Amino acid sequence: MRINSQLYNDISSTMKQLALFVLNSFILPGGRMRLRVFEPRYVRLISEASAGKRDFAMAQLNPYVSQSHADRILPLATRVQIEDFEQLDDGLLGITIAGVEKVQIIKRWQEADQLHIAEVTGIDNWPAQQISTEYQPLVQQMEKLLQQYPALQQLYPCPNYADAAWLASRYLEILPMQPALKQQLALQSSPAPCLDSLQAWLSYQA
């Protein structure tokens, strides 16, 4: 019993409580994203985060289950920080966020205004790793994507193409693929499985 109790205490000590900003979009450490904030619960989330009361994470919706389903919010989320505020042309609040740390949702609930709160534990980020020459086609394709989409170029004025972790993470954020697959690839111990899958897909498309 003492061992079980100690194990529970060790796990609990590594947990932290975060508010969840829930979207279909996906962000990973090193990623940047612009958001329009209009729902009252998310206005409160931003206000509390800005005041240092509670950090928040971006969590991903599972669109293939009902709103009441236990797996409506997928377990991998990313703790983020606010980089910038702006008032948009439509009068809404705009923020720019940056991904900081991958986290695993252990338990979640909703407060009175339906804001999701979660107990999370941290997951190791992919370490920076020199990109292998075999992935140069992926580098070239990402260069084209940033050139084609000015909004992306603005988010990443200094893209780190030489870093395998950076490249794999940006592909997972940008490409349309099933959320569960994105989560599965992002939870791998290195970016290699993601880059291998992307390379195979790119070869098939050629």
Image (tube, helix red, strand yellow):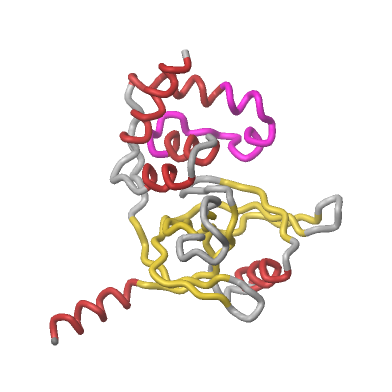
Q: Position of residue 161 (x, y in %)?
A: 46, 29
Query: Which residues, given as a range, are shown in magenta?
Result: 144-165
**Is 154 inside the magenta-drawn segment?**
yes
Relative to residue 21, is residue 10 drawn left or right? left
User: Residue 192's image quarter?
Assistant: top left
For the point 63% across and 70% down, the residue is: 45
Check the image and report above or below for 26 versus 52.
above
Q: Position of residue 184 (x, y in %)?
A: 37, 46
Relative to residue 103, is residue 22 drawn left or right? right
Considering depth in this image, is 91 or 128 the residue closer to the camera?
A: 91
Relative to residue 204, is residue 38 drawn left or right? right
Q: Position of residue 89 (x, y in %)?
A: 86, 50
Q: Quick one: which residue is furthest to the front in this view?
A: 66
Q: Quick one: which residue is furthest to the top in this view?
A: 206
Q: Quadrant of the N terminus?
A: bottom left
For the point 59% across and 54% down, the residue is: 23
User: Residue 138's image quarter?
Assistant: top left
Considering depth in this image, is 32 or 185 the residue closer to the camera?
A: 185
For the point 61% across and 58% down, the residue is: 82
**Is 151 inside the magenta-drawn segment?**
yes
Q: Position of residue 29 (x, y in %)?
A: 46, 49
User: Residue 200's image quarter?
Assistant: top left
Q: Quick one: which residue is furthest to the right in this view?
A: 90
For the point 56% across and 70% down, the residue is: 116
Check the image and report above or below for 119 versus 23.
below
Check the image and report above or below for 40 versus 183.
below
Considering depth in this image, is 39 or 159 the residue closer to the camera?
A: 39
Check the image and report above or below for 94 versus 43.
above
Number of marks present in the image shown? 0
